[in-house]
Amino acid sequence: MTAASGTYPAHWEADVVLRDGSTMHIRPIRPEDAGALQRFHLAQSPESTYLRFFAPMGRLSETDLDRFTRVDHRDRVALVLVHGGEIIAVGRFDRFDQDTAEVAFNVADRAQGKGLGSVLLEHLTAAGRELGVRRFVADVLPRNAKMMRVFSDAGYDVHSELDDGILAVSFTIQPTDRSLAVLAEREQRAEALSMAALLEPASVLLICAGAEGEAFGRMLLAGLQVPEVAESVQVVGLPGYPQTVADLPSGGAGVDLALIAAPASTVLELLAPLAELGVRGVVLYTGGFASASQSGRISQRTLVRRAREHGLRVVGPRSYGLIGSTAGGRLDGSLYPGALRAGTVGVFCQSAAAGRAVLGGAAGREVGISSFLSAGHRVDVSGNDAMQHWLTDAGTEVVMLRLESIGNPRKFSRIARRLSRKGPVIVSFSGITGQLNPPGHEVRTSSEPRAALDELMHQSGVLMAQSIGAALDLSLLLSEQPRPAGTRVLVLTNSGSQVAVTAELLRAGGLRPAGQERALSPTAGGQQYREEVDEALARDDWDICLVGYVPLLSDDGGQVAAQTARLAAESGRTTVACIEGLETLHPALQTQGVRVPAFSTVQRATTVLSQAAAYQQWRERDHGHRVEPEGIDRYAAKRLVHSELLGVEVGTTRRLPRQRGVDLLGAYGIETWPEIRVTTLPEALAAADELGWPVALKTSDDLLRHRLDLGGVRLDLAAPEDLTQAFTAVQDRMRSVLGRTTALDVQPMAPNGTATVVRAVEDPLYGPIVTVGMSGDASELLGDISYGIPPLTDVDLDQMIRSLKASPRLFGHRGLPVLDTGALQELLGRVSILKEDLAEVHVLELNPVLVGERGLSVLGARVDLAHPRRGDVSRRVLPT
């Protein structure tokens, strides 16, 4: 919620990852911090104190301590970064006027170089934007180069002037494309570094306790004792090994990663000593921690809080483990008992059951894995963290995620969009909704249908698979074969029915057969396939080849496979096989370092080929630019919503009065059609005279005001007698339907057009969502609604409109005029910016929006406000 004067803004508290991959807590300062602030100040060097206060200051006076720690969280804001109960850095701003605030920082000498100033600036600008501050200013001594770099490197347009020996710095704090890019890069670098301790540790410590823990430990030890990594592994708690961390040779110093299978209470006791050893990451295989809905046990929140106090990242509880690498070689810290092939596919899953299924399926299909991580209950490390690692991991070319839910969809979308440009990202969901909440998980739920999730994935370039098996099929193809250069598919098979079935499946998947559709002789063998391969190698009219073979009188599958592998190696083009008796990466389908995947059915083969081609088309497509329309007054809008939410209780909504809604929309350049609310016939006649004839008359009831068919609307009222008759008829209808009369709205008739509905909502899970659809029951009942998750590009907006099944009505269907979809796209862009900026807007509905041949008319608008639960995206925050 928005901070009110004097109210402690708990939603500003957050855990963050620093430049070196460690974690720290940021929160508003409190009066009880006076002692810690004094200790922080006294520990600073005279130089640091002088750069902050422009004068020597040996000790803060009681007056200063009171002034610095008692703030109103509105005109005077201060945030502190704390570690182990001590203040490590302080950032604050003091408001000059409604738009401007002076900002200052102070970072402990011992913590400089970790990017703490940048983190403070991110969170202070987020708080400032929330409070309606437009610009930060600062006075900086010219020799304070570190402070100037904090400002200049953040990506804002910074202006500075030297005045009387002091640099006067100023910049607007509205995010820019550059500042968002800087934030994404810093976030990725820090989170990837924190993941390096998990997936690329120099050394590992296995700790076991309790019966269950020892059972897990014995299984893990089998995978950790391979010669290349055995020297990097130490063990505590199993028979024949040291029984405590203190008993380890050299005290166990230098360990990066701890694999722990122990009761919850033991885990908490281990965190502090592990941090002292230098451990940066922990994997928990056992459980015993309580979720928010449980009691009587140590909570998962306590686990996370304690771990982050010591700078530790946590995988689990109930993780199926991980696979990574050490300096010596491949590290297998998973519970999977079988052998797994090394390769280029990074795999993430959540539950242990999913981990077993994914790794078992990968082993059966011979999918080569670069790294694997099972988040278990996902109290800390998530799929977003794993994707941050894979963004810069040269050994991972394909990413596969098996998800039960998404904890932070907006961040997922932001990272996945970047990762998809590097290589394919494949996602399959457990269940139907993508919002499962298994025991031990704490997951926010969405009020939106599955279509919203599908659109988020589509915007991000993610390939959706219907099952683990389908995801592994696709991973196998994309990790072993080049991506399709086009959609033309050459089919070589000796089965006429297979040709027909394949052609139909290809067309359904957006591909097309290359050349003439024909089959070889049913008795064709290796020689006939060799001739076909020679001919295919001389052709350039195909991009993909699917080789099928069904033995009839004799089985020449081995020779057919050899020719298939030769075709793949010599052409360098995407090749798959459907040869009876061969599966996955059969040795017969390998030559010259090229491996051709084999699938048991043409349905499986054509499915993965269609998705691979669609992914390549997505990569090559122009993704547009982030929309930023002109004529937006964000600060007027922010002041309006703040004033309207004063006195509104958290968890309740406030409907904006019509004129205030018009003002809010106007701040974003959205014009609404004028209307006057009336309760009597004389008022209605006067309104029509004022607005100009002809007019429309509508009931004010939310459900009926758009329903011409139910008698809530009368159109084309050109004269007083028409309006008189309509007024009586509508009120009679309201008595019949509602049992009462309602206020009515008089509105001038708008130009003809097709009615659409544009909505924006604040969803508990996804945050801002924008939708568009045609007006009427048909679209609503059939679900013909398009979803967009801001931030949106111009290409995203165009796709939102074109993806509607009824969109041909806008593009000249059956001789109808072509309508101004550009105007609708601009409206969607302005709505998306409004909703991204204003988490306080709970629901915005523009209904109807008449799209004409030139321009459009917004005939109705509804705006509901509520205190927001979404934080600013322009700051680094770990999930809590």
Image: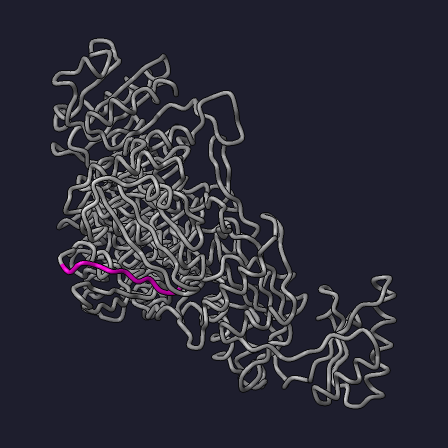
Taking depth in this image into account, of 155 and 539 the one nearest to the observer is 155
Lateral position of residue 172 relative to residue 280, left or right? right
Residue shown at 35% from the left, 22% from the top:
268
Magenta region, residue range: 134-142
Total labels drawn = 0
Q: Nearer the viewer, residue 68 or 99?
A: 68
Please provide percent x and percent y for residue 273. 25, 22
Q: Is residue 556 visible?
A: no
What is the chief secondary structure element of the magenta stretch?
A: strand
Residue 787 in percent (x, y) is at 50, 62
Coloration of the structure image: one colour
Asked if residue 515 lies in the magenta stretch, the reply is no
* Rendering quarter of residue 702: bottom right
For the question of whether residue 833 can be seen, the reply is: yes
Residue 337 in which image quadrant = top left
Q: Quadrant of the C terminus?
A: top left
Residue nearest the viewer, comparing 544 with 491: 544
Decide: is 794 above or below 112: below
Q: Is residue 138 magenta?
A: yes
